[in-house]
Image: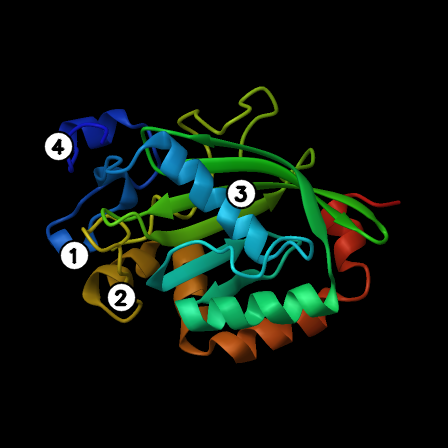
Amino acid sequence: MLGPRRRPLLACALAAAAGCDDGARPEDARSTSLVPTQTPAYYVDQANRYFDAIDASAPASSGPTYSLRVARWELPPWLLLTGYGAEDMAALDEIVKDATPATIPTRECLAFGVQPFARCRVTFEYADGPCPIYEEFTFNDQGEMTFIEAWSDLPGLRPMQDADTWAEAADVARLSTRLPGLGNATGLIDPEGPGMTEAAAGDPEIADFVARTQEFWDHWFRAYEDAGPDLFARGCGWP
C-alpha cells in the first residue's frame, strides 16, 4: 500500500491537476483527491490487462477489473465516449476486436502516485499499419478501473507538450480530473446528479460527456458513421 487512503485538500491543490476540487459533497469528489491503495505493479498489470482485452492475440480470459460505471473517453479524431458501464464496455470491445482486429505488442505502462494512477504509451498493429496511442487509467479505492482516457500519440493530438513524456505538467488537458464522482471511495459517477449538472454548466466537455451517457449506443453509432472511412488514417497518422 502507498500511504493514506485520502489526500487532504491542500495536497489536492498541490497535485496541479485541472479540476482538482472535492467540492461540498463527498460523492462529487474529483479523482485527484484519491491516493493509491494498491502497489505500482497492480496498476501496471491492470493497464496491461485492459490492452489484453482488445488485443486479438491475447488470451480471452485476460481483462481488467472494471468499476460498474466505468467510462472511456477517446479524444478526436476518435469517437469520444466509446464505452460506458462494465457490460457495454466489454460488449463494444468484442465488436471492435472483431471488426478491426489489432495486436498490441509494444506497450510501456507506468504507475503514478497521483491520478491517473496508470499511464501507457502503446502501439496498435493493424493490417494497414501501426497506430500509436497514449492512454490513462483512473482507479477507485477498491482498485477498480473507473475511467479511461485516450489520445493519438501524435504531434498536435496529445494532451501534453512533447517534452512532457508522461503528462505530469499542470496544464495537461484531461477530462478525468474534472469529472465529479471519480474521487469518491467507489469512483461511481452520477451523470444526472447535482454535482455533475453544476460542473456541466461551466464545462462544455463535461456537458458533452453527460449527454453521451444518456444514450450511449445511439451516440456511438452516430459518431462512428460521422467519422468517415479515413478515421484510422487520421488517428494513426497513416499517409
Image point 10% across, 50% down: which residue? Answer: 24
State the image coordinates of residue 129 (x, y, percent, origin top left).
83, 46
Image point 69% across, 33% down: which residue? Answer: 155
Residue underneath mark 4: 8
Q: Residues within 10 Å of mark 2 (few under 14, many from 20)?
A: some
Q: Are marks 2 and 1 in contact (CB under 8 Å)?
A: yes
- Between disc 2 and disc 3, the foreground one is 3
| Residue type highlighted by circle 2 | Asp
| Residue type highlighted by circle 4 | Pro
If you read the primary sequence from the N terminus, does the residue marked by circle 4 or circle 2 appear first?
Answer: 4
If you read the primary sequence from the N terminus, does the residue marked by circle 2 or circle 3 appear first?
Answer: 3
The answer to which of 194 and 96 lies nearer the viewer is 96
The answer to which of 196 and 94 lies nearer the viewer is 94
Say above or below: 175 vs 16: below
Measure the alpha-carbon separation of dots 2 and 3: 23 Å
Q: Are marks 2 and 3 in contact (CB under 8 Å)?
A: no
Residue underneath mark 1: 27
If you read the primary sequence from the N terminus, does the residue marked by circle 3 or circle 4 appear first?
Answer: 4
| Residue type highlighted by circle 3 | Glu
Could you tell me which secondary element the residue under label 1 belongs to?
helix
Confirm whether residue 99 shows in the render: yes
Measure the alpha-carbon separation of dots 4 and 2: 23 Å
Side (left or right) of 33 relative to 18 = left
Picture quarter containing residue 102? bottom right
State the image coordinates of residue 214 (x, y, percent, origin top left).
40, 76
Could you tell me which secondary element the residue under label 3 belongs to?
strand
